[in-house]
Amino acid sequence: MLGYVDETGFSSTPDNRYAWTKIGDVHAVDAIRLKRVNVMGCLLSTGKLVTSCLQESVTSTWFYAYLTGIAQQVKQTYNLPLVLIVDNASIHRSKKMADYRELLKTNFSTNLYFIPAYSPELNRIEMVWKQMKYYWRDFQVMTADKIEQWVEKVSNQFGKEYMFTF
């Protein structure tokens, strides 16, 4: 089985890509600083989207725990080896993660493959993040808890209510 893994972050205020303001007026945006939510996601070759949210910094330990959860789920459900495509983020390449990669391989038949540097287009989950940030998210301020609920909804409804083609 194949999976594309990456992390992203959602702020309480959506990205403002453009806005209209009358000539001569200054465009004002409320500067509300709420907690940011970091999201780890895996897009499996079955079409399933598996996400996990964290309101702290993402570390190699958290990344390993997330991958272990996915590997266990795939092993129990499909009993297949798992290949995960990841980028070259420091948490993926850390010394601590090198030991974790060996544990994933030994315990769950899970291997990590790194895409070339500066090639995010090779990681299909990047398209999911783009859809979530710019098309599926309502243009409103959301608390961290609301963001987590929304991410869970997208994950559960991915392929049904939330879908796109490659």
Image (cartoon, grey):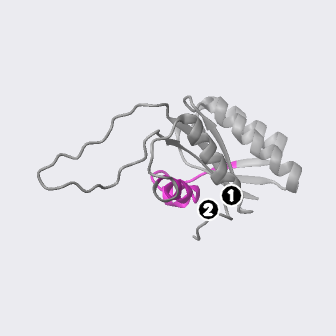
**Residue lying furthest left:** 24
Give 80 or 99, whichever is nearer the viewer. 80
Disc 2 from disc 1: Cα separation: 6 Å
- Residue 122 against residue 58 in the figure, above or below: below
Residue 75 included in the magenta stretch of the image: no
Callout 1 environment at 10 Å: few (<14), some (14 to 19), or many (20+)? some
Q: Position of residue 160 (x, y in %)?
A: 68, 65
The image quadrant of residue 162 is bottom right
The residue wearing badge 1 is: 157
Discs 2, 1 touching: Cβ within 8 Å: yes
- Residue 143: numbered disc: none
Q: Amino acid at mark 1?
A: Gln
Q: Position of residue 150 (x, y in %)?
A: 60, 47
Give 119 or 125, whichever is nearer the viewer. 125
The residue wearing badge 2 is: 162
The residue located at (56%, 28%) in the rendering is: 56
- In the shown orientation, is residue 38 left or right of residue 12? right
- In the shown orientation, is residue 85 left or right of residue 45? left
Give 138 or 163, whichever is nearer the viewer. 138
Q: Amino acid at mark 2?
A: Tyr
The residue located at (52%, 57%) in the rendering is: 136
**Magenta segment, which residues?**
112-133
- In the shown orientation, is residue 14 left or right of residue 38? left
Q: Position of residue 132 (x, y in %)?
A: 53, 54
- Quarter holding the N terminus is bottom right
Give 136 or 101, whichever is nearer the viewer. 136
Can residue 49 be seen?
Answer: no
Label 1 element class: helix
The residue located at (72%, 48%) in the rendering is: 111
